[in-house]
Image (spheres, rainbow, N blue to C red):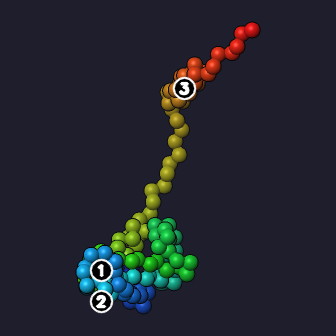
Amino acid sequence: MRINDQITLQEWELTESFSRASGPGGQNVNKVATAVELRFEAERSPSLPAPVKTRLKRLAGRRWTEGGALVLRVEETRSQARNREIARARLAELVLKACERPKPRIATRPTLASKRRRLEAKAHRAGVKALRATPPRQE
């Protein structure tokens, strides 16, 4: 499976399993295994560089297993073939997104005017809250 010019996933890295899907479909749902579970062994993949694997793990979230595999489950359509296509497209999209290096953040300092505005807003808010307080009792 070709992702881009540098990355091509081998077939042994991908495992597909099929099960019955939930949702609409009438009697077809009870008989045909249309849901697709695509498992990509990302941690063991020689195709992916280490930084891409790290970013892919972060992007995958709970779809990432403890064994280092990425599991995608698709049951959107009634067609098994279409669900397979969707799962492979999602995998390719995730890997492509993981290939993009995040732009490094350049630390900036707040301007003097923004500091002044922040402090004025805090003072104003403190004043509003002080007016809500019950006045001290005079005896």
Sequence-wise first label, 3 or 2: 2
Q: CA distance from mark 1 to mark 3?
A: 55 Å
Q: Residue at x 46, y 67 (%)?
A: 59
Q: Is residue 93 left or right of residue 65?
A: left
Q: Quadrant of residue 82?
A: bottom left
Q: CA distance from mark 3 to mark 2?
A: 64 Å
Regarding mark 3 in the picture, which secondary structure is present there? Answer: helix
Sequence-wise first label, 2 or 1: 2
Q: Amino acid at mark 3?
A: Arg
How would you rate the neighbour count of disc 3 (Cα within 10 Å): few for under 14, some for 14-19, many for 20 or more? few
Regarding mark 1 in the picture, which secondary structure is present there? Answer: helix
Q: Residue at x 48, y 55 (%)?
A: 104
Of badges 2 and 1, nearer the viewer stands: 2
Q: State the image coordinates of residue 95 (x, y, percent, origin top left).
A: 40, 73
Sequence-wise first label, 1 or 3: 1
Q: Residue at x 29, y 88 (%)?
A: 32
The C terminus sits in image quarter: top right
Most foreground residue, 89 or 32 = 32
> Looking at the image, is 14 positioned above or below residue 101?
below
How would you rate the neighbour count of disc 1 (Cα within 10 Å): few for under 14, some for 14-19, many for 20 or more? many
* Residue named by callout 1: 83
The N terminus sits in image quarter: bottom left
Q: Amino acid at mark 1?
A: Asn
Most foreground residue, 15 or 34 = 34
* Residue named by callout 3: 125
* Residue named by callout 2: 31
